[in-house]
Amino acid sequence: MGSVKNAREIIQRYSHLSLSCANEAETRKKVIDEVLEKILGWTLDDISYEERVSEDGNTTFADYIIRTADTAILVEAKRVGVTFDTVPDKRRAPLTGRLMEGRTGEAIKQAREYCRKQSIPFAVVTNGDQWIVFPGVRTDQVSFSDSRAIIFDSLSTLLGEDLSYFERLLSREGVIEGNLAVELLGRNEDQFEERRLNKFFSGPVNKDPNPIFPLIENEVTTAFSESIVHADTDLLEKCYVKNADRQKFDNRIKMHLQKREPLFSSKPKRPMRKKESRALVESISSAVQASRPLAMLVLGSVGTGKTTFLQYTRRVSAEEYFRKDPGKAYPHWVNIDFRDFSQSESPLEFIYKEVFDYLKKDDYFKDYKRSIGPAYKDEIEALRSGPMFLVAQDEEGFDRKVAEMIMNDYKAIFPYVDKVVAYGATKAPLFLTIDNVDQFESEEVQSSIFSDAIALASRLRVNLIIAMRESTYVNHRNSPTFDAFDFDPVHIEPPEISAVISRRFFLTGQLLKGKEGEFTARNGALFKVSDLSVFIDIVKSSVLGTEVGERIDVLANNDVRLALRMTREFLARGYTDPAKAIRNYRKDGRYVLPKQEAFKSILLGNQSVYSEKYSVIGNPFDSRIGRSNGELLRLYVLSALVKKGSEDGEAYIEGPVIRENLNAIGFSESDTLEVLSGLCDIRFAHTRSYGPADISSSFFSSRLGGHVVRNLIGDFTFIENVLMDTFIPGRSYWEELKELSREISDERNIVQRIKLRATRAKTFYNHMKEQYKPLYDESVRRALDSNWLGNPLIEMEETLDRNLEKAVRSANNLYGENGKRRER
C-alpha cells in the first residue's frame, strides 16, 4: 500500500512531466508504474506489459494487464498532456453521453475493445492525472451503456483526499477482497444464472427400483440399523466389532493417513484395540474400591459407535458386574440419552427425570425397606426427636406424616432423587452415563448439560461417564466446568468398516434363512424365491473385498453410521434386476452385481439426480463461493493437501500458509476460510486440532479426500453424477451440456445413450480443465511450493478416458448394435 511520502513524490514528479510535455513511455514509467506498484501494491508477478491483443488478423498491444487467478484489470495509458476534457465533475458517471465523447470516449472504447477480446472484466484509462475506472466486460446481462464509471479527476485529488478510497478500490488487497467488483457491479459474485443441470433435468423417480427389497426390508433394517443399542443382547453381541487396526498408508492413492494432535497429556485408554479391550470394564470393576468416584470421558468422531460401545460394555462385557442380586445392593448403570431431550426443558430437569424413572423401575431403589427407608432414616429420626416429637408417640400418625413428607419429595422429584441416590451410592457404585450431548449444535446447551451432570455427580458422589465427539470436547475443554473435574479419557477408534458390514450381512442372511417370496422381475414375469438369503449371499460376494466395498469404506470416512446407511440405500435402490442375479447364481454358483449401479445409488441416496446437499459425498468441482474463477478452489487446495500427504512425516499444511498461497494467486482470506470450511464440512479434509476450520488451524487431507483427487475424479459414474450439481461458467459448454442431456433423455438405444453419456462426461471434464488452468498458471508464475503445482484433472484424464472407453465397450458387448439386452 502507498504512503503519504510516496504520494507526494509522485505528484511532484507528475508536475515536472507536465511542464516538459513528457511522452507516454515517461508517463507510464514515472507516474503510472509508481501508482500501480508503490501506491496500490501490485507486484511484477501481477502485471503484464504490452501484451499482444489479436483478432481477425489484427494485432495491437495492451499497455498493462493486471492479473490474478480470480480477476483481471486492463490499464490503458495515455501520455501527460492528453486531456480527458469530457470527464464530468462527478465521482460517478454513466458510460453514455458526454463521457463517451472526444478523447475520453475514444480511450474508453479502446480499452473496452481490448477487454472484450481478452475477456477482462475491469478497465482503467489514465493520462497519469485523471483516472477512469469502469467495467470492461459484463456477464450479468447489464449493458455497457447502463454501467457507470468511477472517476478521479486529478492526481492531486486521487493521492490526496481520495487516497483511502482509491486504495480500497484498486489496490491488490482491495481487488482481492472484491471491493472493485462490488463498487462497479454491485456484487462480488458472478454466478447468477441457474447453470446447474439438476435444475433442468431429473432422473426417473423410483423410490424402490430394487424389486426384491420389499421382501427383505424388515430384515435389512434390523441388521443394518444405525443403532443396535435397543436390540436384544444376543443381536448386540453378534453385530459388535471389537478390533480396530488403524490403517496408516493407502496404497491405492499412495498417501499417508494422518493422526490428529493428542487431546490429553496422559495416554487415553483405547478399548477398541484387543490388548485394551477390557480397559473400561476394569475401571468400572475397581470403582467400588476407589477413594473418589470414577469420572470418565468417552471420545470418538461422528459415527464411530460411542453409544454402541457403552451399551456393549454394560450389557455384554460388564454384564456380570451389573447382575442384579435380590439379596444385596448391586451396581447401577443409569443411561441418560440426550437424543430424547427437548431444548424447551432444562438439562438438569431432564437428567433428574431420567434418574427418577430408573429409581421407579429398579428392584432395589423402589424397595422401601432396602432403599427408601434407609435413605430417609436420618431425616426421620431428626423429625422424631425434634419438630414432630409431640406426635411421635402415635406411631401410626407419625408414619402417616413421614409418608406425606416422602411423597411430597417424590412428587417434587429433585429432593427424592438426591436422598435416594446419595444413600444408594454408599452401598454400591452408581454410574451415571451421559450420551449424545452433540445432538445440539448450541455450545450453550452443551455447556449446561456438562455443568449440570458434573455438579450432580459431584454432589451425590456417583460415578460419571460422558460420551461426546472429540470436536465437542475441544470446544469445552478449557471451560471451568471441565477444569474442575478430573476425567480419565477413553478414546473410541472406529472399527474396520468392512468387518462391520460383514457382520451385518451375516446377520441379515441368518434372519432371512428359509424365508420365501415372489416379486415382479424386469421382464414383467413373477419371480419366486424359496430362500431369500440367497440374494444376500450374492450381495455379500459383490461387496466384501470388492471395489464397491472399498467405495463404502472410503466414502464413510470412518463413520460407521454412514456406512450402514449407504449399504441400506444401495440394497434398496442399487440393483434393478435381482431376478437375473439369482438365476445366474443358481446356474453358475456365482454372480457379481454391477458395481456402477451400487455406486450410483450411494451417490444419489434417495434423490433422483445428484445434489451435494443430499448426497453422502461432496462436489470437488464447485467451491460454492459464487465466482467462476474460484469455482475449483476446493480441488486446488485439496490437491495440495493430498500431495503433502504423500510425503513422509507429518503431512499438514498450516492455515496461514494456505492463506498466503491463495493470496499470492489472488484470493482473499475470507475465500480461503470458506473453501477450508467447505472441505471440512464435506469430510475431504480435517483440522489437526479436531476444531472447526480456522485460519490458525493446520489441515490435512482425509482418506476420502485422497481418493477424490487420485481415484474418483477419473471415475465415469462419479463424474456424470457430480456434473449435475456443478455450475457451468462457459456459456458454450453450458449449451452443449444441456443439449447432450436432452439427447440422453430422448435416446432409446442403450449403446447410443452410453456413448452420449460418455461424451457429456468428457465435455464437462474438459471445461473443468480449462477452469483449473488459471489456478495452475498463476501458481507456476509465482513459483509457489511444489505442493501447489500440478493439475489433478490432467493427471487423471487418462484414467477417465480408459473408463469411458470401457463403459462403451461393455455396452456394446451386452447390447450390440440394436441396443437391446442380450440374455445369457
Image: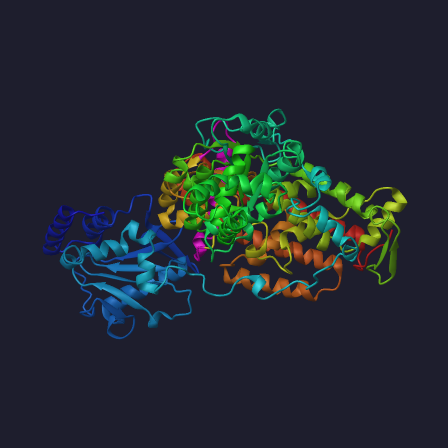
Left or right relative to 588: residue 764: left
Q: Is residue 641 magenta?
A: yes
Left or right relative to 187: residue 193: right
> Which residue: 36% across, 45% down?
663
Give the image quarter of residue 156. Answer: bottom left
| Boundaries of the magenta span | 625-652
> Which residue: 69% across, 47% down?
224
**Total numbered badges shown on the rendered structure:** 0
- Between 638 and 277, which is closer to the camera in this rendering? 277
Coloration mode: rainbow
Give the image quarter of residue 210. Answer: bottom right
Residue 166 image point, x, y percent: 22, 56
- Between 244 and 723, which is closer to the camera in this rendering? 244
Give the image quarter of residue 246. Answer: top right
Is residue 126 visible in the rendered structure shown here?
yes
Residue 578 image point, x, y percent: 80, 53
Q: Is residue 457 magenta?
A: no
Is residue 468 visible in the rendered structure shown here?
no
Left or right relative to 569: residue 452: left
Residue 219 image point, x, y percent: 76, 50
Q: Is residue 745 above or below residue 274?
A: below
Residue 229 image point, x, y percent: 65, 44
